[in-house]
Amino acid sequence: MKVEIRCGGTVRISGYVNAVERDSRILPARMAQGATGDFVERVSAGAFAKAIGRSKDIRMMFNHERDIGGTADGTLKLVEDNIGLYAEAEITDPEVRAAAEKGQLRGWSFGFQKPVVKWDCVGKVQRRTIEDMELLEVSILTKTPAYFGTSVEMRSSETVEIEQRAIDDTPEVKNELPVEKRNISQEINNYKMQIAALECG
């Protein structure tokens, strides 16, 4: 997430909400219907693009609690590229600006319903792959997301169940999964908070 505090009270935030085709950290079974034990989760490439294409308006929220804009009014722009779901937001909300100035913004999350999922296994651990969804909102967080992927799921039912996945909710990762060869430093840098206060011209 990159955060730029601009003259006039505007905060510009950009970055990847979710990297597709990448497994999450190990999550507890209580976070997903159909899980028989701890599991990992990923979003299929193309799932976000389909959801964006069908939606007239995807809202932008602050900590999944307060509406601060959306795609319909142009304050939020969303696109899926070869990495994942990329967002650019122009925000004038005073609370978000204050959090940005204090370095409290930690990352992105998103909310969805009507997921189409597929289950398989990676070693001894279940994996849930989200192949399609109805994307409702993306959220700017003042807490660290549990992993480079979904942090909240809104399920389709009369009572909407919300799963919030903060770091404190996740167990320590055990060496039970095959480890991909990745540039971890680069991934951390891609998601690290970068606050840049721009001087007035």
Image: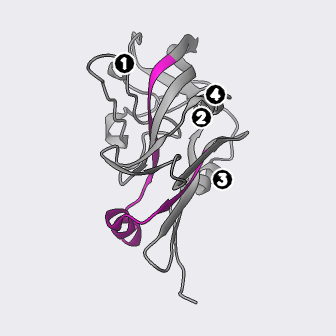
| Spatial CA span between label 4 and label 2 | 6 Å
Quadrant of the snapshot with the C terminus: bottom right
- Nearest the viewer among 155 and 54 is 54
Tell me the kind of residue under disc 3.
Gln
144 inside magenta stretch: no
For disc 2, the marked residue is 52
Q: Report the disc number at residue 50.
A: 4
The local crowd at label 4, few if under 14, some if 14 to 19, many if 20 or more residues have their Cα within 10 Å, is some
Q: Do the CB atoms of the residues marked 3 and 2 lie less than 8 Å apart?
A: no
Q: Residue at x 38, y 21 (%)?
A: 155
Q: Do the CB atoms of the residues marked 3 and 1 lie less than 8 Å apart?
A: no
Question: Looking at the image, is mark 3 or mark 2 nearer the viewer?
Answer: 2
| Spatial CA span between label 3 and label 1 | 30 Å
Residue 116 seen in render: yes
Mark 3: which secondary structure? helix
Quadrant of the snapshot with the N terminus: bottom right
For disc 3, the marked residue is 186
Tell me which corner region of the image, top left, top right, bottom left or bottom right, holds residue 91.
Answer: bottom left
For disc 1, the marked residue is 29
Tell me which corner region of the image, top left, top right, bottom left or bottom right, holds residue 32.
Answer: top left
Mark 1 or 2, nearer chain start = 1
Q: Residue at x 41, y 59 (%)?
A: 105
Q: Do the CB atoms of the residues marked 4 and 2 lie less than 8 Å apart?
A: yes
- Nearest the viewer among 76 and 199 is 76
| Spatial CA span between label 3 and label 2 | 27 Å
Mark 4: which secondary structure? helix
Question: Looking at the image, is mark 1 or mark 2 nearer the viewer?
Answer: 2
Q: Residue at x 60, y 57 (%)?
A: 189
| Spatial CA span between label 1 and label 2 | 29 Å
